[in-house]
Amino acid sequence: MILNKGNLLKKKNDVMELEEYSIKLLTKDRLSEVVELEHKVYEDLANKDILYVDSYDDMYQELVNGGKILGVLNSKDRLIAYRYISVPGSRDHNMGLDVGLPHEQLKKVIHLETTVVDPIYRGNGLQDLTLQIASKMVRKEGYRHLLCTVSPYNFYSLYNVMKNGLKIKSLKKKYANPEDENDGTWRFVLHSDLERTFKNPIDTVISKWANLELQKTLIDDGYIGYELSKETKQLNYMKFEDDTNEISA
Ligand SMILES: CC(C)(COP(=O)(O)OP(=O)(O)OC[C@H]1O[C@@H](n2cnc3c(N)ncnc32)[C@H](O)[C@@H]1OP(=O)(O)O)[C@@H](O)C(=O)NCCC(=O)NCCS
């Protein structure tokens, strides 16, 4: 089933070409193409710390558990971008636990995992578009909370995710691996409650995007990262009167 289709611009030898694309849910038999694109994008990154590389086996298992991969295919049916989402359920890694969701809400959580776009197709808003499609799809299925991690050094991704209503709720080290003495890497944890709008802000503080120390202090003091400006690269942190975390089931 085609979830979306249209035209996009492809950068070829510094010339822009118009090309048709379609977005589909990928089946497990296309997982090796996903991993191939993921590795290609990873190899191309100047700062490898910003992308957590998912293995074939992990993604396969998550698809079995109800996860999905939205694939963006070009006119020749080649995978040029994807968005991978998973359903953590009652497992320990459910990020609802990082942001203090009540226990009964954990089953309504969707993890927005990796999104990658082939460099020659960047700038078409595919991260944004696939997030909008995924968000509508999971909402229809009865899920309520979108959660993801974003590296504080990944401006493009942070901007696209926050533009879609996800708010910064935590800043912590994730993906630690005690086996190789790796204590993890800094990540924002962002959350969107699809059934909630924020009301009655009582304070606002502006932070530079790169000032992690100030942001950590603000988060510890009950502020949430509310908006990111593309122009000034400043984050708007807000505190809300009614931010009680009391979410009814
Ligand atoms: C983050 C990412 C998915 C965004 O791709 P996208 O949806 O095509 O980005 P956008 O369409 O929002 O791009 C907006 C602008 O930023 C630019 N841009 C996007 N990603 C960029 C990058 N990694 N480096 C430099 N410029 C980038 C685009 O060219 C575009 O510029 P323009 O406004 O002058 O045209 C893509 O950069 C990527 O695959 N990065 C590596 C993997 C990653 O970090 N994934 C997110 C974490 S899971």
Image: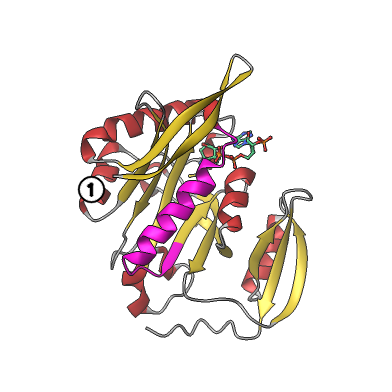
Seen in the image, is 66 located left or right of residue 118? left
Q: Helix or strand or loop: what does disc 1 sit on? A: helix
In the displayed structure image, the side of residue 158 where residue 176 appears, left or right: left
Which of the pair 24/187 is nearer the observer? 24
Where's residue 201, x and y in %?
70, 79
Task: Please state the horizontal and vertical placement of residue 15, each as a whole percent of the image.
Answer: 62, 17
Say which of 107 and 214 sits in front.
Answer: 107
Q: With 70 as the anchor, is 150 left or right in this view?
A: right
Q: Is mark 1 within 8 Å of ligand 1?
A: no
23 shown above or below 207: above
Q: Amino acid at mark 1?
A: Gln
- Region in magenta: 122-146
Q: Is residue 119 visible?
A: no
Which residue is label 1 attached to?
A: 61
Q: Kindly tell me whether residue 41 is visible in this rendering.
A: yes
Quadrant assignment for the N terminus: top left
Q: Nearer the viewer, residue 86 or 170?
A: 86
Vertical relation: 117 (above or below) 234: above
Tell whether position 19 is magenta. Answer: no
| Residue depicted at 55% across the width and 62% down the height | 166
Left or right: 221 as drawn, with respect to 196: right
Q: Residue at x 76, y 60 (%)?
A: 207
Task: Using the rendered view, name the quadrant where residue 37 is placed.
Answer: top left
Q: Position of residue 11 (x, y in %)?
A: 58, 22
